[in-house]
Image (cartoon, rainbow, N blue to C red):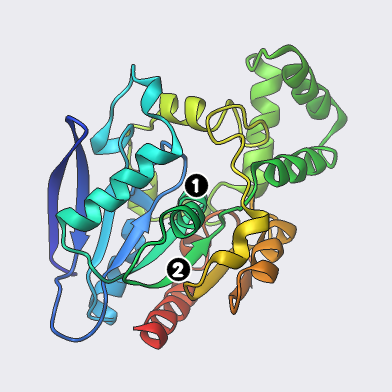
Amino acid sequence: MPKITEGYMPFMGYNTYYRIAGERKNNDKAPLICLHGGPGSTHNYFEVLDNVADEDDRMIVMYDQIGCGNSYLDGHPELWNKEVWLDELEALREHLSLDTCHIIGQSWGGMQQIAYAVDRHPEGIKSFVISSGHPSSSLWEREGLRRIKMMPENMQDAIQKALSTGDFSGEEYDAAVKEYMDRYCNYWLGDDVPECCKRPKKTGSEAYLYGWGPNEFAPTGTLRDFEYIDRLHEIKIPTLICSGISDLCSPLVAKTMADRIPGSKWILWERARHTCFVDRHDDYCKELISWMNAHD
């Protein structure tokens, strides 16, 4: 097991929690920063990558973005937007002296990478791994609504009623959303999922609602206008795109990124949903290690 270091970074008058697996060494291997999903999820599931710190002799940096986990905060809807989360990433890099690094982002974390590259033009990024992210909220929404049409009719009706009335509650709606997430998001491994993925956590429900929306197929928050398809060609950072065959990030969404990010590579993982690095852990880690070493 690698050495684990935990700490807090002051940010906007609050505190951002970070967790480091392994140590930085003089081996020309840039640290890996992990951007979790949500917005409002936590770093927890990235702990499955602790083995990479040992196997690749590389420092892995995870953190709970403001609004969730050990950085939990609510009652501040003005904070739940792209600019705040990008500022936090830049602050973390400065705080931990991460002048050079690789970045992996899952779901919202992948969106964050795209915005970071296009809007902020960061220096010192060796490579990206966009894991089940997306470049367009409208595309994500369309794909979600398309897949809902494949669900049982009563579930389609419950979701359409919620979308038309704005009332996202009730047993029928909850059952339909659960079915949707079981198909495309929840861990493939079921009861065998690692402890860090089952551990109770403080989810940032307010950050998710105000940042994204009430569910995965209705972006109504500050990220509803997240549209970068026509700017993907501006990303000059070597990019590996990973997605699952049964993923919220549908093959169309992943291929849209792969087609437009210059020189990118796309791996479509069988037997995987929205967290391929959990569902296909061993194979994923081999690809991740190989990718980072090729771009150090």
Residue 294 visible in the current orientation: yes
Q: CA distance from mark 2 to mark 1?
A: 14 Å
Quarter of the picture holding the C terminus: bottom left
Q: Is residue 176 above or below residue 151?
A: above
Q: Which residue is mark 2?
A: 128
Q: Residue at x 15, y 53 (%)?
A: 95
Residue placed most toward the observer, 285 or 230: 230
Mark 1 or mark 2, which is nearer the start of the sequence?
1
Seen at 28% across and 81% down, the residue is 56
Residue nearer the viewer, 246 or 163: 163
Residue 290 placement (x, y as % from top left) = 42, 84
Which residue sits at x=71%, y=29%?
176
Residue at 66%, 30% (x, y): give it: 218
Counting from the top left corner in percent of width and height, residue 200 is at 33, 36
The quadrant in which residue 17 appears is: top left
Q: Position of residue 116 (x, y in %)?
A: 43, 55
Residue 280 placement, left or right of 220: left
Instruction: Report the amino acid beneath label 1.
Output: Trp
Return the mark for residue 108.
1
Left or right: residue 265 versus residue 67 is right
The secondary element bearing badge 2 is classed as strand
State yes or no: discs 2 and 1 in contact (Cβ < 8 Å). Answer: no
Camera-nearest residue between 40 and 261: 261
Q: In the rendered image, is residue 272 in sight? A: no
Mark 1 residue element = helix
Q: Is residue 99 above or below residue 44?
A: below
Q: What is the x, y in percent for residue 277?
A: 47, 64
